[in-house]
Image (cartoon, rainbow, N blue to C red):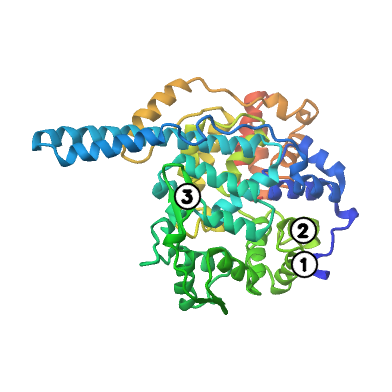
Amino acid sequence: MRMLKALSAARWNFQTAAHLLNRAGFGGTPEEIAKVQKLGLDGAVEWLVDYEKTPDAMKAPEWAEPDPDRLKAFQEAREFRQKLNSATPEERQALEAKRREMRRVQQRNQGQQMVQLRGWWLARMAKGPRPLQEKLTLFWHGHFATSVQKVKDAYFMYLQNETFRRHASGNWLAMLKDVTKDPAMLIWLDQAQSRKQQPNENYAREVMELFALGEGHYTEKDITEAARAFTGLALNRLEQTSDYRPAGHDDGEKTVLGKTGRLDWEDVLEQIVAQPQAPKFICAKLWTFFAAESPSEELVNALAAIFRKHDNQFKPVLRAMFRSEAFYAEPVVRTQVKSPVQWLVSSARLLERELPPAPVATNMLANLGQNLFAPPNVKGWDGGVTWITTNNLLERYNLAEALVYGKNQIRINADNKALKTVANRLNRRNAQPTLVDADKLVGNEDRKSRSALIASLERRFLQAELKPKQKQALNDYLNSQGELDSHDILEAIRLVMSTPEFQLT
């Protein structure tokens, strides 16, 4: 297809290889980019897209399994309620105090597990062997936008994250089916409370509007009927799994998107995916995430045709996208604002340093506006230029300094005494900064002249040239120093990371 014509071999170079790594993953060092360049375009795309061929030995968090004490906890809760019903006013007061303390302990444990879960996922992004799989997992997290603030269960959030990872580049219908019955989603969009006597329409609406079709491609009647079809899906909190309960399902005749019958939830999802709009909607979302906003109708149709031809599988679409001239076109390259996650993970990779400790990294991302597992609403993060505000940009510059100079400190802006206590304890633990190794990033050859040093920093951190104003400011700083030492190199790196160009990828 003309719109998806493959990039010519003559245009495959260090810059285009870097662009592919930046968008299909989280960037790379000059050495990593050179390895990808050596693979050639087809080899590089195959390595990224066929990621299951690369072994992945990264383990799940230790607590990420069904809770063996779940039944005991349910029994204790039942006994507690019985005691509460028959208690005297004095006994009731003591029992209520005990219940509040139990909730505080539970909330604290959940909070600790969520910090660990965020740190675990960030480590997968920064060090995992399958960059595209993690980038896709991040895409699906934003697409299905489920928040722990309502789910209140770290294990359920882990399960959903693994669902996204398992189906990341697979079949669209299989993904939708597993997401629909996912425990976190059942809670997030209230499907767990839906009954045939009173169907809840939240999930029926969002699966059409936000997940699979977009506004204007369904009717309110479709939502009402689909909600009836979704009844029967339930949550088994004891087993920590989803359930299908036929007794709770509305088995009557329904009509959804033109199909009539005694439809159940799988019938509805199959009908949604069969709509002509379905491949266009999800392919446009993928292009927007990986390439650029507002793809042309011709481009979307070309991607959708590949999607349909290959039975709604994402791999062929991704392969065509990453090989296409359009993906490497001037309006696409280095025009995307880095999300906070992209900024943090790629910065750590470029600096060849460890990510900050999980509580510090979590706080950084929250301050930058992208708290993982806690999107702002059902639409997820808006992305693009909305990532950049005056405050957020200043925060990026401050955090760039912290990363370069190894200051793993937490700053709590909110007036929260408990959070500040935790932050102070962690800050004392991380009081000794660990500097980035300047000698590892900049060799002796690149220090022989100011111009050579600047070119080296541009190649590593931008894969492009600084704007004249920024380059002059960097040159003025270097010329103001004597013989350049490691501190001067680190300061130069900090200055590059504090430019508008570094905020783009």
Q: Nearer the viewer, mark 3 or mark 2?
A: 3
User: Which label belongs to residue 316?
Assistant: 2
| Label 3 CA crowd tier, 10 Å (few <14, some 14–19, many 20+) | many
- 87 vs 334: above or below: above
Specify the amino acid type for callout 2. Answer: Pro
Percent x, y of residue 124:
62, 37
Q: Nearer the viewer, mark 1 or mark 2?
A: 1
Q: Secondary structure at mark 2?
A: helix
Q: Secondary structure at mark 1?
A: helix
User: Which label belongs to residue 184?
Assistant: 3
Label 1 to label 2, Cα distance in Å? 9 Å
Compare marks 1 and 3 and give the one earlier in the sequence: 3
Label 1 to label 3, Cα distance in Å? 32 Å
Does the residue at mark 1 contact the one at mark 2 (Cβ under 8 Å)?
yes
Viewer-nearest residue: 56 or 405: 56
Quick one: quadrant of the N terminus?
bottom right
